[in-house]
Image (tube, coloured by chain):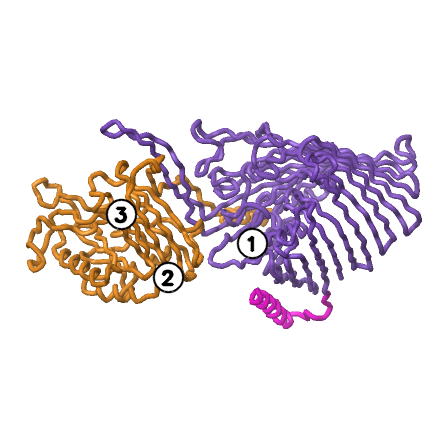
Chain colours: A purple, B orange
Amino acid sequence: MKKIILINLLLILAIIPVFTFSQDILSGGKVTGNVQIDGQFYSEDSKLGISDSSLNYKKFGMNGFANFIYTNGDFSAGMRAEGFLNPMLGFDPRYEGYGVPYWFAKYKTGSLEMTAGHFYEQFGSGLVLRSWEEWTLGYDNNIYGFNVHFSPIKGVMLKGLVGTQRYFWEPYENSNRGIVRGFDGDFYLNDMFESLAESKTKIDLGGSFVSRYEKVPNLTFSRDSAYIQINELGDTSEWIQRTTYQYDLPYNVGSWAARANIASGGFNFYLEYAQKGNDPNATNNYIYKKGSAVYSTLSYSTKGLGLFLATKWIDNMSYKSKLTESGNPPMLDINYLPAITKEQPYSMATVYPYATKQNGEFGVQAQVAYNIPKNSAVGGKYGTNLTFNYSLAKSIQKDPISADIPVDSSGTEGYKTNFFSIGDLTYYQDFNVMAEKKFNSKVKAKLAYFNQTYNKNVIEDDIFDEEEMVHANIGVLDLTYKFDAKNSLRMELQGLFTKEDKGDWAALMLEYNVSPSWFFSVQDEFNYGNPVSTDQIHYYNFSLGYNEGSNRISLRYGRQREGLLCVGGVCRYVPASTGLTITLTSSF
Amino acid sequence: MKYRIQIILLISVLSGFVWMACDKIDQPLVIVDQQNIPVNISDTVYFVDSVVVTEKQVLLEDFTGHLCVNCPEAAIMAHELAASLDHKLIIYSVHAGYYATPDPNPASLYTDDLTSETGEALYADFQVFVNPNALIDRVKHGGAVQVNPDNWQTAVNSELEKPNTANISLINAYYPNLNTVRIQVKSKFTTPLEGKFRLCVYIAEDSIVSPQKNNNPAVGPSPDWEDYIHRNVLRGAINTTYGEYFSADGTIAANEIYPKEYFYEINPNWVANHCNIVAFLLNEETKEIHQVAECEIKTE
C-alpha cells in the first residue's frame, strides 16, 4: 500500500515540473479541499446482541477521507487520501487500510481536455457507463486510466476513456479484472446549426459505446440427471449422471446507447435506449441473453407548478468489469441504472427503501409539486407547498425459452421477454403526499403521509416471490418554532404502521438550534409493535454539533437500527450498533 | 461547416464501433466431464485401497505403440528404474499416434486398440511425434519437454531432487456389484505457489497381454512378441485430460486441504483388479506436474 502511495505521489510530483517549464504553474494557483472523519466507539449492548466478541474486539471504527485539489488556469491536479482503520460497522472489511485510491492530473488546451489518473465519468443517464462515488455507501467505482474530452466544433462534445475500476485497495495486475473502454458523443443541434440557433426548442442527441475486456476464468458447473440401470439378472440400481459443463465466456462485452433530449418552453423530454451484448455473469446466473434498457423522463415546470414523470425498463443489464463479481457492496459496476423513487428525508420513510434490480425491472414515477399561492383562502399568508409522488417498481415478464428449461438457467439464453413487458410481481411501491406551510414568522410545519409496499424477499434477498410483502403507512409531522433570529426548536413526530415484518414504530426527535454555531438533538425510534417482545427496542440518540465557518464537529451517542441504507437505488446493509460517533468535516 | 459536421459524425460512429468490441457466443456450454454416480452406495459392498504421498514423486508418461520396435526395451528399462527408486517413479504408457494405430486387417497380429482419447490429446498437445519418448513431470529437460529413453534416468533424478511442494492422499473404494470405483483425493500444497493449479485423475490398466513389435532379442521375442505384457496402459481421464481447478479460480493456499471425489464406472472389457488410479497436480500455465500418486483398485 505504501508503495502505491509513494508511486502516486511521485507521479504527481513528476508531472508538475513538466508544466513548470511550459507555464508558470505555481503562481496564481489555488488549492481547495475538504475532509471528513467519522469515528465510532462501540459498546456492548445485550438488547441488540452486541458483545465484544461479536464486534471482533474492534471497539473503534474510523472512516475518513481528505480531498486536495490544486487548480491553476487550465491545469488541475488532486488526490484523495482515505483511511478505514478499522472500517466502521456495515462497511466491507476489505476497505481496511490507508492509502490514496484517487489522484489525477488534468489539463485543458484549446478544445481538448485530458485527464490522467483516476476520474469519474458518465455517459448520458449512465445506462452504459457511470463511474461515481458515494461515501455513505462505501461505493466507489472510479476509473484509473485516461479520459479525453474533445470539442472539435461548437455544440459537439466527444469523450473517450480507457481504464480499470477501483476494487477496494486491490491494484490492477495480472488481469485480475477487466479493462473498460468507452466513447461518447453529445451533439447540441442548436449550437451546431445556425438555422436552429434561435429556435426555442433545444435538441440534444447523444450516443455511447462501451466495451469491457476481461481475461475470463475457466468456470464450470454440474447438472445431475437420475436413471435406473437393470443388469442381466434383473437387478436394478439407481444412478445419477453428473455432467460438468464449462462456460465459453466472452472476453469482450460491448454495449451501446442512444439518447435524445428535447426542451421547449417549460417542457423537457429525455429518452435513452441501451443495449448490451451477451454477458454471462454472477449477477444474472451466467445467462447469455443480450441486455437492454430504456429510461425516459418528461418534466414540466411553470410558476407554482412542477410535473415530473419517469419510466424505465431494465432487462438483464448488470454490467461489471469482472464477471464473477456480485453481492454487497456492489463493486466494479460499469453502468448505473437510475432510481425511480424519491429520496426520503424522514427516518421512518427510509425503513423500507427501494433498491434497483439489475436483472429485470419496470419502473414508473410521477411527481407533482404545487404551490398554493400566498394570500389565497387555502394558501394563507405565506402560501402552501404540496408535493405528490408515486413510484412503482415491478418485475418484467420472463418466459422460459423452452418447456424443459427453467427461466434463468445457467448457460442458456435465460428467458424470453417482450420489449417493455411488465410482470406480475411488485418489488416496491410508494405513494406519498407532503404539505409544507408557514403559519407565521415563528411557526412552520410539514405534514407528510407515505404508503409503501415493500417486497422484502426481492429487495433484501433476491428471492423473487411475494411471500414477504410489507405494507406500511407512515405519518410525519415536522414542526419548527423560531424563538428569535438565532434560536429555534424543531420537532419530528413520526409513526410507521404495518402488520408485517417488525410491526409498528414511533419516532420523536427534538432538535434545538442556536444559529449559526450549535445544535442539540434528542431522538428515539421505538419499535413498540415488534411481534417479538424482546425486540421492542428503543433506538435512542443524543447529538450535539458545533459549526465554525466551514468546520463542523458533531457527537452522537445512541443506537443505530439495522437495515438497508440506499442512495439512488444502490444499497448498503447497516447492522445494529450502539456507541459514540464523532464526525468532523471541514473544507477550505 | 456542413462537411465538417458530417466528418465528425462519421468519425464518432466509426470510433464507437471500434471501441465497442463484443464477442458473440453461439455455443455457451462445453461438456468437460460426465460421471455416473451410484445412489444408495452405503448399502453396497466395497473394497478399499489407499496411498498417502508426502515425498516428491515423479510421473513418466511413456509414449509408445505396438508397432514401435524400440519401445519394449525402453518400457522395461523404465520399470526397472521405478523399482530401483522404490516406486517413487510412477509410469503409465500412452498408446497414441502412428505406431499405436490398430491394423484394420483382421488377420494381422496388431488389431488391438490400446489408444485413448486422452492419450491422443496429450500426443498432439505435447507434439510427441517419435516413439519411444516420454514426458517426465511435463518439465523441459535439455530444452525440450519430450525426453528420449537415454535421458530418462537423468531427468527422473533431476525431478526427484526437487523439494516436495504438495502432498496427496488417494483412496479408491471399489463396488464390485456396480463395477464402479469411488475415488477420493485430498491435496495439500505445503508451500505457497503462484498460478492456477488443476487436479488430474487418470485410469490405467496393467498387464494387458497383446502383441508388440520388438527389435531387441535380448529383452524378448523378435520381431513379434506375441504375448507381450503391456504395463499400465493409459485408459482415459476421469476428470478430463487437464483436470479441474482445486478452487473456484484455480489459485491455491498453502496448507489448505482440497478434497475431490469422483465416481467412475469401469469399462467391463477391462480387468478391474489390474486397474490403477493416477492422480497428479498440475500448474495450468507451465503445465508442469508438482506431485503424483498412484493407487491400485482392490477388488476383493
Q: Cα distance, mark 3 to mark 2?
A: 24 Å
Give the residue displayed 39% in from the left and 39% down from the top: B27
Residue A250 rendering spot, x and y as whole percentages: 44, 46
Residue B293 rendering spot, x and y as whole percentages: 30, 54
- Residue kind at label 2, given as amino acid type: Thr
Local crowd at mark 3 within 10 Å, few (<14), some, or many (≥20)? many
Q: Which mark is residue A488?
A: none
Question: Does the residue at mark 3 contact the one at mark 2 (Cβ under 8 Å)?
Answer: no
Give the residue displayed 20% in from the left and 42% down from the top: B270
- Residue kind at label 3, given as amino acid type: Ile
Q: Mark 1 points at which residue?
A: A165
**Are the residues flagged by discs 1 and 3 from a single subunit?**
no
Give the residue displayed 37% in from the left and 51% down from the top: B186
**Are the residues flagged by discs 2 and 1 from a single subunit?**
no
Local crowd at mark 1 within 10 Å, few (<14), some, or many (≥20)? many
- Residue kind at label 1, given as amino acid type: Gln
Query: To which chain does the residue with label 2 belong?
Result: B
Residue A418 visible (yes or no)? yes
| Type of secondary structure dominating the magenta stretch | helix
Residue A408 rendering spot, x and y as whole percentages: 49, 35
Residue B66 rendering spot, x and y as whole percentages: 14, 50
Q: Mark 2 points at which residue?
A: B165
Q: Name the residue under label 3.
A: B203
Query: To which chain does the residue with label 1 belong?
Result: A
